[in-house]
Image (cartoon, coloured by chain):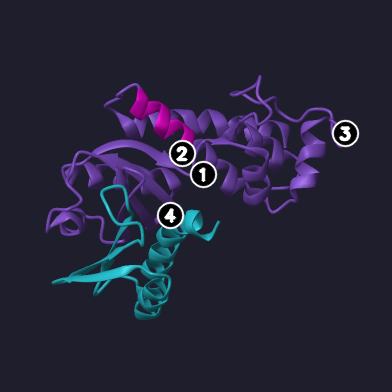
Amino acid sequence: MKKFEFSIIASGLDPEAEDFEQRFYDAGCDDAAIAFQKGHIIVDFTREAKSVSEAIVTAVRNVEAAGAHVDRVEPDPLVSLSDIAARSGMTRAAMTQYSKGQRSKDFPAPVARVTSESPLWDWATVAKWLFQHDKLSRDEAIEAAAVRAVNEAIGTRASKLEETLKGSLKAYEKDLDRAA
Amino acid sequence: MIEAVVADAEQKGWRWRQMGHWGRLFCPHAGRDGCQVGVNGTPKNPEDHARQVMRAIGRCPHGKEEDK
C-alpha cells in the first residue's frame, strides 16, 4: 500500500450548509480535507491504495456519493516550466534550457498557450521524458498519466472510469519502458 | 498538531468557527468569495489532515493581495 496525494475539484453542494464537510466524510472521504476556495469545492485526499488508479477511482466515487459533481482531478495536467521545475526538483533555469533545446534536443513541445510567452506542457508527456532521462521516478510518471486519463474520462463522461483508466495506463507504461 | 495549524491560521487573520464535530476556518477576505477550510476534530490520520489543511490555507490568494 502506498499513499497518494491529489485533489478533486467539485461542484453542486452548498459550502455554507451545516453538514457540508460531514456529507463528504460519511460518503467515504474520511481521508480528505474539504475546502471551498476560488468558487470551487476542493477535496484534498491523502489516500492509501494499491495503485494510483485505485486511489483516484475510489475517491471520485466517494465525492459523487456525497452528492457533488466531480469537475476534475488535480495536480493540474497542464504545467508551466515553473511547475515542471517544482515537480521534478530541478531549477527553473535548467527547465528553460531544456525547453529551448540547449541541454537536450528532444524535450516535448508545449501543448497550450503556444503563442504566448508562458506556454503550457502536458505533464504526463513531460513526465515520460523526465523518467527516460532519469529526472523523475517511474511511479511519479504513472501518477501523471493517471491524472491525465481520469480528467479525459471525466470530460467525455465515460461511465466506465476504471476500465478507461486501466487501458490508458497500460499503454502509457508500455511506452515508458520501451524507451527507458 | 492540527491545533497548531489552526492557531497559526488565526495568527494570520483567519477566523475559526466550531461546528460540532468539525470546525471551519475562514480567510481574512470576508464575503462570498473568501476561502473556507473544513477542519475535522478527530481525523483518521492527524498528520495527513494537518498537512491538507495547511496546504489549503497556503492556496488562499487573499492574504497575498493584502501583503502588496
User: Mainly helix, strand or loop, the magenta region?
Assistant: helix
Q: Earlier in the sequence, mark 3 or mark 1?
A: 3
Q: Is residue A140 left or right of residue A129?
A: left
Residue A54 painted magenta: no
Tag 3 subunit: A
- Shown in purple, the chain is A
- The CA distance from mark 2 to mark 4 is 28 Å
Assess whether mark 2 and mark 3 are in contact (beta carbons under 8 angstroms). no
Residue that mark 4 sits on = B62
Residue at 70%, 41% (x, y): give it.
A130
Q: Earlier in the sequence, mark 3 or mark 2?
A: 3
The relative height of residue A176 versus residue B38 in the rendered view (above or below) is above
Where on the picture, by quarter, is residue A69? top left
Residue that mark 2 sits on = A147
Along the line of sight, which residue is nearer the eye, B26 or B58?
B26
Which amino acid is tagged 3?
A: Gln
